[in-house]
Image (spheres, grey):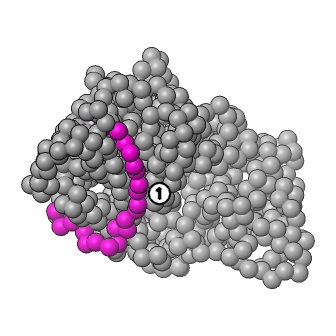
């Protein structure tokens, strides 16, 4: 896995559309070079929503996919000159759509030898460097290694190091030489940094194999090396938000450290960052050591935006120096898809469409997830039922077989639907949109109550006589729907008139109040068990089940085996919202 060569000096292609040579008389000549950037593409190649089986659309008119990105990239290469442009990406590339899932799980590229759809599209567009995101590790190191080999662009991750030796497990950086006609070449160094949270989120795949070091420390180590090798411009591509906050506790380095890198590491001209899925057209941060302004930009998600960074370089005593920098984000909804990319992706896209439209079961009635954030809904009970049954079966004949099995699930998607009649893979994937695996831990009654109190922070406190405004009831403090866990197998009330921390009432199992020391087995996903969302007790609780079964696949397999989805067999009202003890609905 170690890269034999730490620095690869690439040459930007000279396209036919390169700008004509200019005769520079003055020694203090200036030149502008452009670095384009994407991030968080998450397996989007075409402007297609596999869950809806139609072209992607949202309320803001956004589009998705590399075919759209390609058209914008071609336009900028034509306008600025291909010899003056580069294209980078800041990670989360190979996970996130049924297309990406299919070539990781149904026909894994590390077993079939087929070209990964994201490698196919990115190679065709001509990326110059790509950085590892945390989701690159979701499908294990062998699949990741295959994708890295398939990519023509170097795949970077300076702070992903071998657990034993501490040496880089992936290429840390690359230097691209831009040969501009009539001018001294411009050398652009790019350092790739990934997210330390991988150690938690993909513990099963990386534990004992990889460590993830601090972004700032890693940049302080590598930026001087890149400068020492003659880079005129240094761009850090970081799969980390810019806030300096972390979604996890513990001893891991800071999750969202992009602005910290800009502030604390001398010699960085710009940071192309990702992970947070935000659009940041242009932001400047002052470096504490040099006082220089460092440019930051984030191009949103899924190929909806392209960041465009312009660097003005002035030749001083024969050497290039950055004398200006600016950036903007371009909306990919302003252009048509690149027909070349559409044609390239057709076969893999069609295979995925066929797969997601495979019917797995018949539903007795329409089940909707729209009310799941504030009501116990049958569609979420279906997830709970499958998780509970899977864990119960695995515990047969073990010391824990006699314990009650409970289950935790969150409302990932308010738009998920099981139609009355045929239910497809697509419907299942639309309900369970993450590639989580199923685990089970042992918790006490007291720990369960703590856990539910933490989860119930999701609601804003409701005054005794206030009207119930559903839009204002949920997502308190910015808590996303996927961090509102609901527990099945017990009954309880959530009193939204009470302050957070005092909301859970009447927690009972089979009609009896749950005792503080009572033992339960709880089915839970790997993201939550490993610390995602910061819920109490689960990271240290004894693990009694971890067979690496993907929850979405378990839902599909269960539906296929039973052939029928009938709420009469699994829907049970386990929890309800109350106000001062009276039901809210």
Is disc 1 placed on a helix, strand or loop? strand
Q: Is residue 110 visible?
A: no
Range of magenta residues: 320-341
What x and y, as percent, mark residue 31?
26, 48
The residue shown at (78%, 70%) is 577
Asked if residue 477 is positioned above or below residue 243 in the image, the reply reads below
- Residue 483 appears in the rendering: yes
Q: Position of residue 374 (x, y in %)?
A: 70, 71
Is residue 333 one of those drawn in magenta? yes
Pointer 1: what residue?
Answer: 282
Residue 531 in percent (x, y) is at: 63, 42
Q: Is residue 84 above or below residue 191?
A: below
Q: Is residue 181 above or below residue 67?
A: above
Q: Using the image as rendered, state which of residue 141 and residue 405 is in the foreground.
A: 141
The one nearer the camera, 342 or 482, is: 342
Left or right of 146 on screen, residue 360: right
Furthest-front residue in view? 26
Direction top: furthest residue? 165
Relative side of 216 to 27, left or right: right
């Amino acid at each position: 896995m170690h890269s034999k060569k730490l620095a690869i000096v690439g040459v930007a292609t000279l396209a036919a559309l390169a700008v004509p040579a200019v005769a520079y008389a003055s020694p203090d000549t200036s030149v502008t070079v452009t670095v384009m950037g994407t991030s968080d593409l998450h397996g989007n190649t075409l402007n297609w929503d596999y869950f809806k089986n139609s072209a992607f659309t949202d309320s803001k008119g956004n589009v998705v996919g590399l075919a759209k990105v390609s058209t914008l990239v071609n336009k900028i290469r034509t306008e600025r000159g291909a010899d003056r442009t580069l294209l980078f990406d800041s990670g989360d590339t190979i996970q996130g759509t049924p297309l990406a899932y299919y070539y990781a799980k149904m026909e894994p590229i590390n077993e079939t030898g087929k070209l990964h759809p994201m490698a196919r599209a990115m190679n065709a567009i001509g990326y110059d460097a790509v950085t590892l995101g945390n989701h690159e590790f979701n499908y294990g190191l062998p699949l990741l290694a295959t994708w890295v080999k398939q990519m023509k662009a170097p795949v970077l991750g300076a702070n992903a190091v071998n657990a034993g030796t501490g040496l880089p497990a992936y290429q840390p950086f690359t230097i691209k030489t831009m040969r501009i006609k009539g001018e001294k070449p411009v050398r652009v160094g790019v350092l790739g940094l990934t997210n330390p949270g991988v150690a938690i989120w993909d513990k099963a795949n990386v534990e004992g194999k990889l460590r993830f070091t601090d972004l700032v420390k890693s940049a302080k180590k590598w930026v001087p090396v890149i400068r020492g090798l003659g880079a005129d411009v240094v761009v850090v591509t970081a799969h980390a938000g810019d806030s300096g906050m972390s979604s996890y506790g513990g001893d891991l380095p800071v999750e969202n450290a992009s602005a910290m890198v800009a502030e604390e590491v001398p010699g960085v001209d710009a940071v192309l960052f990702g992970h947070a899925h935000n659009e940041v057209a242009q932001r400047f941060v002052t470096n504490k050591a040099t006082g220089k302004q460092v440019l930051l930009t984030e191009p949103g998600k899924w190929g909806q935006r392209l960041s465009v960074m312009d660097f003005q370089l002035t030749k001083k005593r024969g050497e290039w120096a950055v004398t200006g920098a600016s950036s903007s984000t371009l909306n990919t909804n302003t252009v048509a898809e690149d027909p070349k990319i559409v044609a390239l992706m057709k076969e893999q896209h069609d295979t995925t469409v066929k797969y997601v439209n495979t019917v797995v079961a018949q539903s007795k009635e329409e089940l909707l997830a729209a009310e799941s954030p504030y009501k116990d809904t049958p569609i979420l009970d279906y997830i709970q039922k499958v998780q509970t049954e899977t864990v119960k079966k695995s515990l047969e004949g073990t010391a824990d077989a006699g314990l009650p099995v409970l289950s935790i699930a969150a409302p990932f998607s308010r738009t998920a639907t099981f139609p009355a009649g045929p239910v497809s893979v697509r419907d299942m994937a639309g309900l369970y949109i993450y590639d989580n695996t199923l685990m089970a831990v042992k918790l006490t009654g007291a720990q369960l109550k703590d856990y539910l109190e933490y989860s119930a922070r999701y609601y804003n406190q409701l005054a005794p006589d206030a009207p119930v405004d559903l839009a204002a009831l949920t997502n308190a403090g910015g808590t996303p729907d996927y961090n509102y866990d609901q527990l099945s197998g017990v009954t309880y009330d959530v009193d939204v008139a009470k302050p957070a921390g005092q909301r859970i009432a009447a927690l009972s199992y089979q009609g009896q109040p749950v005792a503080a020391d009572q033992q339960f087995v709880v089915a839970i996903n790997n993201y939550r068990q490993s610390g995602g969302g910061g819920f109490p007790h689960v990271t240290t609780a004894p693990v009694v089940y971890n067979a690496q079964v993907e929850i979405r696949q378990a839902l599909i397999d269960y539906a296929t085996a039973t052939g029928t989805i009938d709420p009469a067999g699994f829907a049970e009202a386990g929890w309800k919202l109350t106000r001062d003890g009276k039901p809210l609905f």
